[in-house]
Image (tube, rainbow, N blue to C red):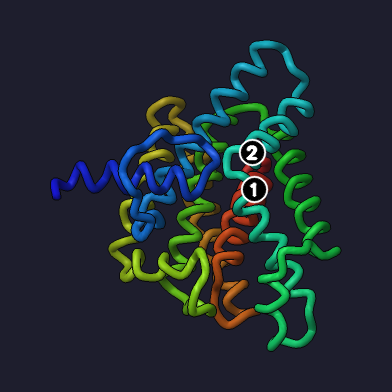
């Protein structure tokens, strides 16, 4: 199979798996390698949000309303996949007995801690975006990209805790550090774009430092609490990295 045909198939599979965007395809999609394209897909999602944000700004929508709208659109585009994982992870971590945490996380019912975490994440993203007045398009793309690169790091670095599940095949897709490099280089290039456009080296360095550190530390924290990762914690890494990254960027 030609590489570009496989890449096209992997991209369509990644869009289908990670988003609610309808993709009309006739062939059977293979989801085994979708994790490799997660940062690229994140940047694309951030780009869609940036375009919608620019249109809302053109229509003179107030900043707070616009920020809340963009956060809501982000949840809609992903179908709440990652936010649901963050909620399930919070419910699991709230259980004192470590042996019961995974069973609680697989329960489809949302508990009080999951609901509270969802509110906190949405509130952090909304308020952070409200405080960001410049380079919103770039920071939206960077946040979505670093969040999904953090997912790749968690997949590679830590054991998967379930024999089956939606996230189980991700482990076979990210097998060594070289699988992390394309996403990392893509995000470095995104930061370099900021230098070319505005010559703002400080912001570019801050984006790389904050994004990479938060992406790594978030996954490490969940591994420390659970002894590994699941599909739910992969989603939690995405959501918390995005939210914390935007909060840090308000400083700049």
Pointer 1 residue: 80
Q: Are marks 2 and 1 in contact (CB under 8 Å)?
A: yes
How crowded pointer 1 is (Cα within 10 Å; few <14, some 14-19, many 20+) is rated as: some
In the image, is residue 155 above or below residue 66?
below
- Location of residue 248 in the rendering, given as x and y in whole percent from the top left corner: 65, 48
Residue 188 visible here? no
In the image, is residue 138 above or below residue 98?
above
Name the residue rendered at 38%, 29% in the picture.
196
Secondary structure of the residue carrying numbered label 1 = loop
Secondary structure of the residue carrying numbered label 2 = helix
Task: Give the CA separation, mark 2 to mark 1.
Answer: 6 Å
How crowded pointer 2 is (Cα within 10 Å; few <14, some 14-19, many 20+) is rated as: some
170 vs 180, nearest the viewer: 170
200 vs 58, nearest the viewer: 58
Quarter of the image for the C terminus: give it: top right
Pointer 2 residue: 76
Q: Which mark is residue 53?
A: none
């Amino acid at each position: 199979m030609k590489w570009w045909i496989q890449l096209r198939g992997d991209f369509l599979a990644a869009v289908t798996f990670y988003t609610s965007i309808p993709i009309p395809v006739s062939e059977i999609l293979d989801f085994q390698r979708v994790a490799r394209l997660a940062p690229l897909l994140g940047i694309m999602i951030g780009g869609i949000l940036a375009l919608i944000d620019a249109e809302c700004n053109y229509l003179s929508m107030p900043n707070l309303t616009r920020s809340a709208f963009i956060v809501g659109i982000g949840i809609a585009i992903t179908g709440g996949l990652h936010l649901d994982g963050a909620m399930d992870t919070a419910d699991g971590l709230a259980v004192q007995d470590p042996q019961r945490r995974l069973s609680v996380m697989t329960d489809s019912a949302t508990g009080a801690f999951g609901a509270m975490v969802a509110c906190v994440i949405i509130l952090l993203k909304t308020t952070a975006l409200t405080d960001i007045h410049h380079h919103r398009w770039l920071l939206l793309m960077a946040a979505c990209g670093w969040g999904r690169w953090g997912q790749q790091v968690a997949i590679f670095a830590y054991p998967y805790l379930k024999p089956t599940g939606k996230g189980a095949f991700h482990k076979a897709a990210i097998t060594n550090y070289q699988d992390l490099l394309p996403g990392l280089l893509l995000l470095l290039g995104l930061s370099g774009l900021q230098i070319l456009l505005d010559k703002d080296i400080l912001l570019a360095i801050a984006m790389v430092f904050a994004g990479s550190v938060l992406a790594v530390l978030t996954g490490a924290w969940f591994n420390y609490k659970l002894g590994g990762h699941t599909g739910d914690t992969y989603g939690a890494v995405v959501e918390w990295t995005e939210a914390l990254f935007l909060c840090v960027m308000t400083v700049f």
